[in-house]
């Protein structure tokens, strides 16, 4: 008999808990948001097979109450429990609150102090989590993928989940990458008039970037390095690997290389591979 699945979606206020719950609801989970700890225990014995509960700093008077509930949940052998902790940078959360003009659940002298205080209080919950998602740069599509890989929502157990992300160095390095490869040494299509307005998703740009000997030599070495590293990561128990491919603006070279790597990595049966182009998602091109 399959175990009942209970997902606790928690984390920092303004980090996307409601969005995550909506995504889980679309995937067949019975969802409840803003659930108090004392009510949460009633769901341990329910007959509902897939439950997602939104619980945050408003769910308890003392953090020990939440810790006790989560430990009880994790120790229940009849339940497959997952605790997903959502977070984002202080700057991102601050901007989100300023945009929505909503009140932070903790009252301090300033919004920034409220956010800082919550990070401190919730740190113990973060340590208990089974998965952490940083939503600073996330769009719903990327959040869906991260939830899918953490919870194995497609039912396929993969050796490792690989996220390949192109980006532009001029906009900063993504905060959650494990490996970064700088491809700014490759010939730049930006300076070719007929390619300037296109991207690495276009065949003309991809053919241009991949058509140079230096690109081919680099790509062979890149594949060789990853073929060496990834099995070692798997052996050490790493389940998620984010590979960043960066060029100047994140539109041409990095996109072309990331797409090539995505196609090759997707051929490996026990890899669950996802690709995103950060600057495209940010409407930089």
Image (cartoon, grey):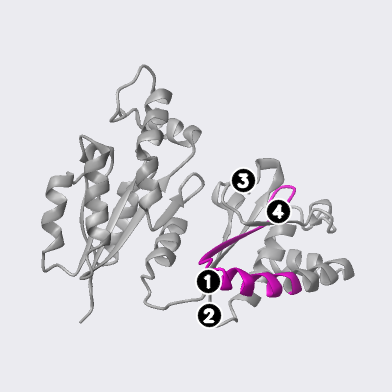
For label 4, the SS is strand
- Of callouts 2 and 1, the N-terminal one: 1
Q: State the residue position of label 3.
A: 284
**As rendered, which of 257 and 1 lies closer to the eye?**
1
Q: Residue at x 34, y 20 (%)?
A: 108
For label 3, the SS is loop
Q: Residue at x 25, y 62 (%)?
A: 75
Category of crowding for the residue at label 4, using alpha-carbon neighbours closer than 10 angstroms: few (below 14), some (14–19), many (at least 20): many
CB contact under 8 Å: marks 4 and 2: no
- Of callouts 4 and 3, the N-terminal one: 4
The numbered dot on residue 270 is 2
Q: Quadrant of residue 49?
A: bottom left
Category of crowding for the residue at label 3, using alpha-carbon neighbours closer than 10 angstroms: few (below 14), some (14–19), many (at least 20): few
Give x and y (percent) for residue 136.
49, 44
For label 1, the SS is strand
Q: CA distance from mark 1 to mark 3?
A: 30 Å
CB contact under 8 Å: marks 2 and 1: yes
**As rendered, which of 273 and 124 lies closer to the eye?**
124
Q: For the residues carrying marks 4 and 2, which lies nearer the camera in this image?
A: 2
Category of crowding for the residue at label 2, using alpha-carbon neighbours closer than 10 angstroms: few (below 14), some (14–19), many (at least 20): some
Q: State the residue position of label 4.
A: 246
Q: Is residue 211 visible?
A: no
Q: For the residues carrying marks 1 and 4, which lies nearer the camera in this image?
A: 1
Q: CA distance from mark 2 to mark 3?
A: 33 Å
Magenta part of the chain: 224-252
Q: Residue at x 41, y 34 (%)?
A: 96
Q: State the residue position of label 1.
A: 160
Category of crowding for the residue at label 1, using alpha-carbon neighbours closer than 10 angstroms: few (below 14), some (14–19), many (at least 20): many
Q: Is residue 137 visible?
A: yes
276 on left or right of 105: right
18 on left or right of 268: left
CB contact under 8 Å: marks 4 and 3: no
């Amino acid at each position: 008999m399959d175990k009942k699945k209970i997902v606790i979606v928690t984390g920092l206020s303004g980090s996307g808990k409601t969005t995550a719950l909506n995504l889980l609801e679309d995937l067949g989970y019975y969802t409840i948001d803003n659930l108090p700890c004392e009510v949460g225990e009633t769901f341990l014995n329910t007959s509902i097979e897939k439950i997602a509960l939104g619980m945050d700093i408003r769910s308890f008077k003392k953090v020990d109450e939440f810790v006790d509930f989560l430990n009880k949940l994790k120790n229940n052998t009849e339940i497959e429990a997952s605790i997903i902790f959502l977070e984002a940078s202080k700057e991102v959360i601050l901007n989100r609150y300023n945009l929505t003009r909503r009140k932070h659940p903790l009252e301090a002298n300033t919004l920034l102090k409220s956010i800082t205080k919550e990070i401190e209080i919730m740190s113990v919950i973060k340590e208990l989590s089974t998965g952490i998602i940083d939503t600073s740069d996330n769009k719903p599509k990327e959040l869906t993928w991260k939830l899918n890989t953490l919870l194995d929502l497609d039912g396929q157990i993969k050796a490792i989940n690989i996220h390949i992300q192109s980006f532009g160095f001029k906009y900063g390095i993504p905060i959650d990458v494990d490996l970064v490869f700088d491809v700014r040494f490759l010939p730049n299509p930006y300076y070719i008039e007929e390619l300037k307005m296109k991207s690495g998703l276009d065949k003309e740009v991809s053919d241009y970037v991949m058509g140079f000997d230096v690109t081919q030599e680099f790509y062979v070495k890149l594949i060789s390095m990853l073929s060496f590293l990834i099995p070692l990561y798997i052996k050490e128990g790493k389940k998620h690997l984010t590979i960043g491919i960066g060029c100047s603006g994140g539109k041409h070279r990095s996109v072309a290389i990331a797409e090539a790597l995505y196609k090759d990595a997707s051929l490996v049966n026990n890899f669950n591979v996802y690709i995103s182009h950060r600057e495209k998602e940010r409407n930089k091109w």
